[in-house]
Amino acid sequence: MDSEVRRLSLRTGIAVPCLVQGDPSAQPLLLLHAWGESRRSFDRLIPLLEGLQILAPDLRGHGEADKPRGGYSLTDQARDVEAILDALGLESAAILGSSSGGYVAQQVAVAHPGRVSALVLVGSPLNLAGRPAFADEVESLRDPLDEGWVRQSLEWFTFHRQVPGWFVEDRVRDGMRMPAHVWRTALEGLYQAVPPTDAGPIGVPALILWGEDDEFLPRRDEEVLAGRIPGSVLKVYSGTGHLILWECPEQVAADTRAFLAPSRGWSGGS
């Protein structure tokens, strides 16, 4: 399968790397990672998404993307995503967002509706408004980061299934690549934003994947989110929590492929 990492210069003033893999004539699927992670968080998912053109960028401030002092509001991040599609020459794409990446995906669907053909929201919140319990920790961060703190931050969410050790170590490396100001301002951009579905409608099909033991996102919120997106499908994963992408990549891939299958209306092209 053809695969390359392109360095995209965005009209929003930054440059980001983007993995591009698969048949250019296949349905494009843009993968948006969570806060504190990178495109490499999809390393176990991507090989299972046969038949799709995969586009996986590092978002502003994360991984190997530029790390400016500002531009981390939810609307700014949605503009970056639109600019990524422009840089790739794509009119639209399906978007799969993991955790806060799904929050960004919702904002793109609300603010730039013509650019999104479908959503797959993996452990994605309805509402992040309000200061989270760990905000004080994040606001106290200074460079250079303490690797012990980054490692401990992964324990904010309980593991319900076994996750490979190498994958966890990669997420520690993701965290260490982020300067303290990105940890702080990117989190602020999420919790200070108007929740996307409060700001406007989402008019594209959505698959919402939620772990029944998620201690961060209550089931009622996911049901409300599904109710706000006409024709959406809410699928509950038993025996897993918030870290669905980490714990269940095979199931996420199978459900995503089924949801985006040609029989659901994809006709090829971009």
Image (spheres, rainbow, N blue to C red):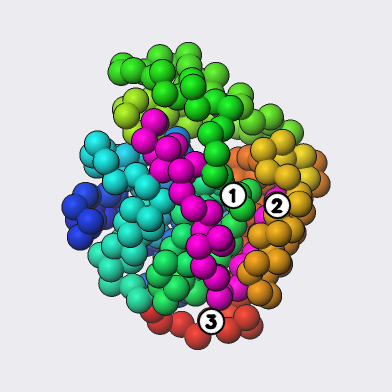
Q: Which residues fall within the magenta stretch?
A: 183-211
269 is higher (above) or lower (below) than 187: below
What separation in Å lies between label 3 and label 2 (alpha carbons)?
29 Å
The crowding category of the residue bearing disc 2, from other C-alpha atoms within 10 Å (few below 14, some 14 to 19, many at least 20), is some
What separation in Å lies between label 1 and label 3 (alpha carbons)?
30 Å
* Foreground residue among 245 and 202: 202
Residue 112 at x, y percent in the picture = 40, 70
Q: Earlier in the sequence, mark 3 or mark 2?
A: 2
Q: Earlier in the sequence, mark 1 or mark 3?
A: 1
Circle number at residue 127? 1
Q: Quadrant of the C terminus?
A: bottom left
201 falls in the magenta region: yes
Q: Amino acid at mark 2?
A: Asp
Residue lying at 39% horizontally and 19% vertically, measured from the top left: 141
Residue 39 at x, y percent in the picture = 42, 46
Circle number at residue 266? 3
The crowding category of the residue bearing disc 3, from other C-alpha atoms within 10 Å (few below 14, some 14 to 19, many at least 20), is few
SS category of the residue bearing label 3: loop
Residue lying at 50% horizontally and 62% vertically, measured from the top left: 199
Q: Which residue is mark 2?
A: 221
Report how many numbered discs are placed on residues in the image. 3
Circles 1 and 2, Cβ within 8 Å, touching? The answer is yes
